[in-house]
Image: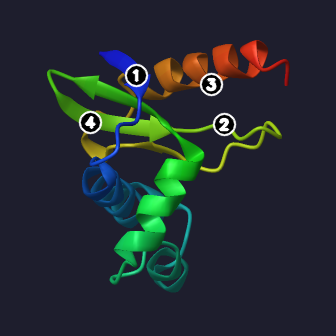
Amino acid sequence: MRIRKYRPGEEETLWRLFFETVRTVNRRDYDDEQVRAWARDDVDAEKWRERMAHNEPFVCEEEGEIIGFADVQPSGYIDQFYVHHAWQRRGVGRRLMDAIDAEAARRQL
Protein backbone atom coordinates (compact mmCIF):
# COMPACT_ATOMS: atom_id res chain seq x y z
CA MET A 1 0.00 0.00 0.00
CA ARG A 2 1.14 3.49 -0.78
CA ILE A 3 -0.16 6.88 0.34
CA ARG A 4 0.04 9.87 -1.98
CA LYS A 5 -1.82 13.08 -2.74
CA TYR A 6 -4.90 13.07 -4.98
CA ARG A 7 -4.34 13.82 -8.65
CA PRO A 8 -6.78 15.79 -10.81
CA GLY A 9 -8.65 13.33 -13.02
CA GLU A 10 -9.31 10.84 -10.19
CA GLU A 11 -12.62 12.39 -9.18
CA GLU A 12 -14.83 9.71 -10.72
CA THR A 13 -12.87 6.92 -9.03
CA LEU A 14 -13.08 8.72 -5.67
CA TRP A 15 -16.82 9.31 -6.13
CA ARG A 16 -17.41 5.63 -6.87
CA LEU A 17 -15.36 4.59 -3.82
CA PHE A 18 -17.27 7.07 -1.63
CA PHE A 19 -20.64 5.93 -2.97
CA GLU A 20 -19.96 2.20 -2.63
CA THR A 21 -18.48 2.62 0.85
CA VAL A 22 -21.44 4.58 2.19
CA ARG A 23 -23.95 2.29 0.51
CA THR A 24 -22.34 -0.88 1.90
CA VAL A 25 -20.27 -0.22 5.04
CA ASN A 26 -22.32 2.61 6.52
CA ARG A 27 -25.61 0.71 6.24
CA ARG A 28 -24.64 -0.91 9.54
CA ASP A 29 -25.10 2.40 11.37
CA TYR A 30 -27.58 4.40 9.28
CA ASP A 31 -31.01 3.65 7.89
CA ASP A 32 -31.74 3.52 4.16
CA GLU A 33 -33.06 7.08 3.98
CA GLN A 34 -29.93 8.48 5.66
CA VAL A 35 -27.59 6.45 3.45
CA ARG A 36 -29.39 7.54 0.26
CA ALA A 37 -29.27 11.19 1.35
CA TRP A 38 -25.55 10.93 2.16
CA ALA A 39 -24.59 9.08 -1.04
CA ARG A 40 -27.18 10.22 -3.55
CA ASP A 41 -27.86 8.35 -6.76
CA ASP A 42 -27.13 11.49 -8.73
CA VAL A 43 -23.91 13.42 -8.44
CA ASP A 44 -23.01 16.89 -9.60
CA ALA A 45 -19.68 15.95 -11.16
CA GLU A 46 -18.46 19.56 -11.27
CA LYS A 47 -19.20 20.17 -7.57
CA TRP A 48 -17.50 16.89 -6.68
CA ARG A 49 -14.45 17.83 -8.77
CA GLU A 50 -14.30 21.22 -7.03
CA ARG A 51 -14.58 19.54 -3.63
CA MET A 52 -11.71 17.18 -4.40
CA ALA A 53 -9.57 20.05 -5.72
CA HIS A 54 -10.30 22.05 -2.58
CA ASN A 55 -9.86 19.18 -0.09
CA GLU A 56 -6.74 17.73 -1.75
CA PRO A 57 -7.20 14.32 -0.14
CA PHE A 58 -4.57 11.72 0.52
CA VAL A 59 -5.14 8.57 -1.52
CA CYS A 60 -4.20 5.04 -0.57
CA GLU A 61 -3.51 2.72 -3.46
CA GLU A 62 -2.52 -0.88 -3.89
CA GLU A 63 -1.04 -1.99 -7.21
CA GLY A 64 -2.40 1.14 -8.88
CA GLU A 65 -5.95 0.73 -7.51
CA ILE A 66 -7.32 3.46 -5.24
CA ILE A 67 -8.60 1.75 -2.09
CA GLY A 68 -9.17 4.71 0.23
CA PHE A 69 -8.96 8.46 0.61
CA ALA A 70 -9.06 11.04 3.37
CA ASP A 71 -8.33 14.71 3.93
CA VAL A 72 -7.57 17.17 6.69
CA GLN A 73 -8.65 20.79 6.38
CA PRO A 74 -6.60 23.83 7.48
CA SER A 75 -8.78 23.98 10.61
CA GLY A 76 -7.90 20.37 11.46
CA TYR A 77 -11.35 19.13 10.43
CA ILE A 78 -11.46 15.80 8.59
CA ASP A 79 -14.09 16.23 5.89
CA GLN A 80 -13.76 12.86 4.19
CA PHE A 81 -12.36 9.51 5.29
CA TYR A 82 -13.37 6.48 3.22
CA VAL A 83 -11.95 3.00 2.79
CA HIS A 84 -13.26 0.77 0.01
CA HIS A 85 -15.68 -1.82 1.35
CA ALA A 86 -13.48 -4.68 0.10
CA TRP A 87 -10.46 -3.26 1.98
CA GLN A 88 -11.97 -2.80 5.45
CA ARG A 89 -9.83 -3.92 8.43
CA ARG A 90 -6.67 -4.30 6.34
CA GLY A 91 -4.68 -1.28 7.49
CA VAL A 92 -5.86 1.26 4.91
CA GLY A 93 -7.51 3.53 7.48
CA ARG A 94 -4.45 3.43 9.74
CA ARG A 95 -2.18 4.47 6.88
CA LEU A 96 -4.51 7.29 5.89
CA MET A 97 -4.72 8.46 9.52
CA ASP A 98 -0.93 8.42 9.80
CA ALA A 99 -0.73 10.64 6.70
CA ILE A 100 -3.33 13.01 8.14
CA ASP A 101 -1.51 13.14 11.48
CA ALA A 102 1.77 13.95 9.74
CA GLU A 103 0.12 16.66 7.65
CA ALA A 104 -1.55 18.15 10.72
CA ALA A 105 1.83 18.22 12.51
CA ARG A 106 3.46 19.80 9.48
CA ARG A 107 0.78 22.51 9.49
CA GLN A 108 1.01 22.82 13.28
CA LEU A 109 -2.69 22.06 13.71
Instruction: Give the alpha-carbon distance from disc 3 to disc 2, as whole Å.
Output: 6 Å
Q: Dot 2, how many residues are within 10 Å of its Cα: few (below 14), some (14-19), or many (20+)? A: many
- Sequence-wise, the earlier of marks 1 and 3 is 1
Horizontal side of 55 relative to 106 (left or right) equals: left
Quarter of the C terminus within the rendering:
top right
- What is the x, y in percent for residue 69? 44, 38
- Looking at the picture, does residue 105 appear above or below residue 45? above
Residue type (three-letter) at the residue carrying disc 1: Arg
SS at mark 2? loop
Residue type (three-letter) at the residue carrying disc 3: Ile
Residue linked to disc 2 = 72
Residue type (three-letter) at the residue carrying disc 4: Ile
The label nearer to you, 1 versus 3, is 1
Is mark 1 in CB contact (under 8 Å) with mark 3? no
- Sequence-wise, the earlier of marks 4 and 2 is 4
Residue linked to disc 4 = 66
- What is the x, y in percent for residue 32? 46, 81
Residue at 33 percent across and 54 percent down: it is 11
Instruction: Give the alpha-carbon distance from disc 2 to disc 1, as whole Å.
Output: 14 Å
- What is the x, y in percent for residue 94? 52, 21
- Name the image quarter holding residue 6: top left
Residue linked to disc 1 = 4
The label nearer to you, 4 versus 1, is 1
SS at mark 4? strand
Q: Which residue lies furthest to the left in this view?
A: 63
Is mark 3 in CB contact (under 8 Å) with mark 2? yes
Residue linked to disc 3 = 100
Residue at 58 percent across and 50 percent down: it is 54
